Image: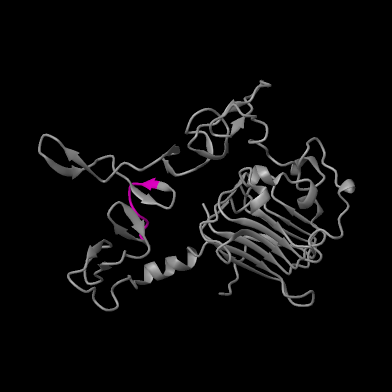
């Protein structure tokens, strides 16, 4: 585990951590771990998706452990935990998470298998005392903490199992099947997030290839509309911190390829025979620097009441 300190991303008091600067973050690519926290509440006011591309112990996208004084984790805009489990253990006062959060909404109707709680979780809770204001499910008692629901309200009418309520209407309409986390309107351009890839704000199944077949010439030619795959996006150019391999932006060249650092190029090339020693992966300073920011984790650790609270952020956030 690395250690770090980022200033200006959040503000905290003895009772609360609240993400400032517009509710950073919006998405977490990997996992969120909150461990041994001795404050009363943590707010992620604009967090919408936890993707779970990188899981804690290869299983968990959200882990809450040994938080003996934490009473509220408030994530009112959270729509989906795409992959991985939710694990809650030895966090005795997180009562809203026990009785008022609709986990099937977040875990794609699979809370029975993906929500894991220990015997020590919620032991100080009385569900009858937990109240929501103006809604059935919530992260805390105030109305602004109502849980956004877009699956359970659809019934069986939507193939995507996601829907939205149009303005001035009482009838829910279905989201496009390319969406994840629901939508704000009809069509693949109004998704909260894309299940696969985003091309100029439109959710698609694949990016336009960089090369296309010209039937007249009988050969591959550059596609003027081609895009590289970068994370979950189709981009015209790869970020300068990354290498380029075929139609993708990569951190490492694939097995059998290498990055020739003697050339003014970021492209991965096939090795001629055995890959040169030390060149299977690029070690350029730009790429090494990028790996730090791509570690895909958010860790919130507080060691003790007397120690200065330390916040550690490792994430690639969109």
Identify the colour scheme used: one colour
* Residue 236 within the segment the image draws in magenta: yes
Q: Residue furthest left?
A: 217
Instruction: Relative to 179, say whether 6 is above or below.
Output: below
Residue 171 in view in this figure: yes
The one of 226 and 172 positioned closer to us in this rendering? 172
User: Residue 1 appears in which quarter of the rendering?
Assistant: bottom right
**Residue ID at (76%, 75%):** 304
The one of 269 and 145 positioned closer to us in this rendering? 269
Task: Please indicate whether residue 103 sits to the left or right of residue 292 in the image.
Answer: right
Give how far across and how far down residue 47 sits, in percent: 62, 49
* Residue 214 within the segment the image draws in magenta: no
Instruction: Relative to 107, say whether 93 is above or below.
Output: below
**Residue ID at (43%, 69%):** 289
**Residue ID at (24%, 73%):** 275
Task: Please indicate whether residue 72 sits to the left or right of residue 54 in the image.
Answer: right
The one of 151 and 185 positioned closer to us in this rendering? 151
User: Residue 68 appears in which quarter of the rendering?
Assistant: bottom right
**Tally of numbered discs:** 0
Give how far across and how far down residue 75 sits, in percent: 69, 49
**Residue ID at (81%, 53%):** 95
Give how far across and how far down residue 127 sits, in percent: 86, 49
The one of 18 and 234 positioned closer to us in this rendering? 234
Q: Residue furthest front?
A: 113
Give how far across and how far down residue 266 sits, in percent: 28, 62
Task: Please indicate whether residue 296 sits to the left or right of residue 147 in the image.
Answer: left
Residue 78 in view in this figure: no
The kind of secondary structure the magenta stretch mainly shows is: loop
Which region of the structure is painted magenta?
234-240
């Amino acid at each position: 585990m690395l250690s770090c300190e980022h200033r200006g991303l959040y503000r905290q008091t003895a009772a609360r951590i609240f993400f400032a600067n517009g509710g950073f973050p919006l998405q977490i690519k990997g996992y969120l771990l909150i461990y041994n926290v001795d404050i009363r509440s943590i707010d992620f006011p604009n967090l919408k998706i936890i993707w779970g591309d990188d899981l804690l112990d290869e299983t968990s996208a959200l882990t809450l452990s040994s938080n003996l004084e934490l009473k509220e984790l408030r994530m009112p805009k959270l729509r989906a935990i795409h992959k991985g489990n939710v694990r809650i253990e030895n966090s005795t006062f997180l009562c809203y998470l026990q009785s008022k959060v609709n986990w099937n909404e977040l875990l794609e109707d699979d809370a029975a298998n993906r929500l894991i709680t220990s015997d020590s979780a919620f032991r100080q809770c009385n569900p009858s005392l937990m109240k929501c204001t103006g809604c059935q499910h919530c992260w805390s008692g105030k109305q602004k903490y109502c849980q956004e629901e877009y699956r359970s309200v659809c019934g069986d009418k939507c193939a995507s199992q996601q829907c939205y309520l149009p303005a001035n209407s009482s009838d829910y309409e279905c989201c496009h099947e390319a969406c994840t986390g629901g939508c704000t309107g009809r069509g693949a351009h109004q998704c909260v997030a894309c299940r696969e890839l985003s091309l100029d704000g439109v959710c698609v199944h694949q990016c336009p290839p960089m090369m296309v077949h010209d039937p007249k010439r009988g050969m591959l030619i550059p596609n003027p509309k081609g895009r590289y795959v970068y994370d979950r996006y189709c981009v015209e150019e790869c970020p300068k911190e990354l290498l380029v391999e075929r139609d993708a932006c990569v951190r490492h060249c694939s097995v059998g390829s290498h990055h020739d650092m003697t050339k003014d190029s970021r492209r991965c090339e096939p090795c001629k025979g055995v890959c040169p020693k030390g060149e299977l992966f690029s070690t350029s300073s730009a790429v090494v620097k990028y790996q730090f920011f791509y570690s895909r984790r958010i860790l919130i650790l507080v060691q003790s009441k007397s120690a200065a609270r330390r916040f550690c952020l490792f994430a690639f956030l969109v």
